Amino acid sequence: MGKILVTGGTGFIGSHTCVSLINAGYEIVVMDNLCNSKVESLARVSLITGKNPRFYKTDLNDYKEMCQIFEDHKIDAVIHFAGLKAVGESVKLPLTYYHNNISGTINLLKVMEKYGCHKFIFSSSATVYGENNPVPYTEDMPTSATNPYGYTKVMIEQILKDVCTSNSDWKVISLRYFNPIGAHESGLMGENPNGIPNNLVPYIAQVALGKLDKLHVFGNDYDTPDGTGVRDYIHVMDLAEGHVAALKYANSVNGFEAINLGTGKGSSVLDVVKAYEKACGKKIPLEIVARRPGDIAESYADATKASEVLNWKATYSLEKMCTDSWNFTKQNPKGL
Ligand code: NAD
Ligand code: UFG
């Protein structure tokens, strides 16, 4: 069996997936340009698994260096996490986002085609369901976006469909993640954003650490049970296991398939605050402020397809996600 190339493998979801892949017996090769992560996360992967995956510090857009990876290793499949992911930043830097995410993916697909590697698992997002679909989201709903980041996911999915039409050797799974949070339970790996976090749980973690004063809750006048935004939070290790299941399933895929990875259950901002307070044993001070532009009231998955075709289901509770996030945060107060 060939190896699995993990792009973006030093990032948050990629590094956790490396652990699951190694534990499932796969041999992996990791590439990342380290623009949003540190190579230390691979040292943590090694500490947890006892294996030292080969690492390439390379940019997706570097055709020659990407080819070199395929020259050095027989790659059986690619799991493609590498990409920029900050919604607000994408509005300010659209060309950077389109170049990095879309051109980078096209370059990777060209290299794969050259080396006859056609198994591809892509990190898509629930953001492709846009603003107008009713929850829970099913994979057959129309996709759309409201910002350049979201458009990169919508467009890459279209490119992948077209590539599959052009050559029936391709086996492509687009995994649409809902809201990944939590950390490996060892506390050795977790989410490590630069600067002030944009996302809810990393922000709460910094408040719990005492680095930030209070959480700003973006609106409590949504049409939801307590008025705050509802999301489908999923433990990053559940998500990691979803990739192992997808890799197995990819062998029987013909062409393009989209699959949601979520729990199917929505939690409000206040539910998350309560669970985090329980996990860290502290009060999280908060203030209700205006809605954040671009936010929707509710987003959660219909998780039926993943359980049917991947034989995979999320297993961890919101409490466990918060406990593991806090465990990582307090063991690594300055990040990795
Ligand atoms: P992350 O930033 O921790 O990981 C992405 C990695 O890609 C980083 O290590 C970064 O250095 C690397 N990278 C970016 N551009 C690159 C390039 N041109 N060449 C090489 N490496 C490059 O983010 P994450 O949360 O682990 O997300 C992984 C993937 O999942 C992304 O594609 C993201 O859009 C998608 N996703 C994330 C979420 C989420 O909430 N975290 C939700 C849905 C989808
Ligand atoms: N929220 C706050 N205060 C904060 C941060 C967030 O109240 O400081 C609220 C938001 O309004 C939202 C919820 O917490 O109701 C979750 O917000 P996040 O920023 O954590 O996550 P989003 O659902 O907005 O977005 C995430 C990723 C996107 C991805 C999307 C769908 O950041 O990249 O999930 O997968 F597109």
Image (cartoon, rainbow, N blue to C red):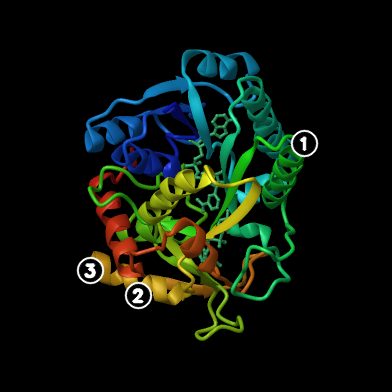
| Helix, strand or loop under label 1 | helix
| Helix, strand or loop under label 3 | loop
Q: Is residue 86 above or below residue 259?
A: above
Circle 1/circle 3 CB separation < 8 Å? no
- Asked which quadrant contains residue 138, the reply is bottom right
| Helix, strand or loop under label 2 | helix
Q: Residue tagged by mark 3?
A: 281
Mark 2 Cα shell of 10 Å, populated few (<14), some (14-19), many (≥20): some
Q: What amino acid type should be assigned to the residue bearing mark 1?
A: Ser
- Residue drawn at x 46%, y 64% is 307
Is 89 left or right of 35, judged from the image as shown? right
Q: Residue tagged by mark 2?
A: 274
Is 28 left or right of 295, judged from the image as shown? left
Q: CA distance from mark 1 to mark 2?
A: 50 Å
Instruction: Say which quadrant the N terminus sits in.
Output: top left
- Residue drawn at x 72%, y 53% is 147
Q: What amino acid type should be assigned to the residue bearing mark 2?
A: Lys
Q: CA distance from mark 2 to mark 3?
A: 10 Å
Residue sitting nearer the eye, 6 or 291: 6
Is 268 left or right of 54, judged from the image as shown? right
Please tell me in which quarter of the rendered image ligand 2 is found: bottom right
Q: CA distance from mark 1 to mark 3?
A: 55 Å
Which numbered circle lies on residue 166? 1
Tell me residue 206's x, y (percent).
37, 55
Tell me residue 234's x, y (percent).
43, 61
Tell me residue 179's x, y (percent).
49, 60
Is 177 left or right of 132, judged from the image as shown? left
Q: What amino acid type should be assigned to the residue bearing mark 3?
A: Gly
Indicate which disc, 2 or 3, sits on the residue closer to the N terminus. Answer: 2
- Residue drawn at x 71%, y 50% is 154
Mark 3 Cα shell of 10 Å, populated few (<14), some (14-19), many (≥20): few
Circle 2/circle 3 CB separation < 8 Å? no
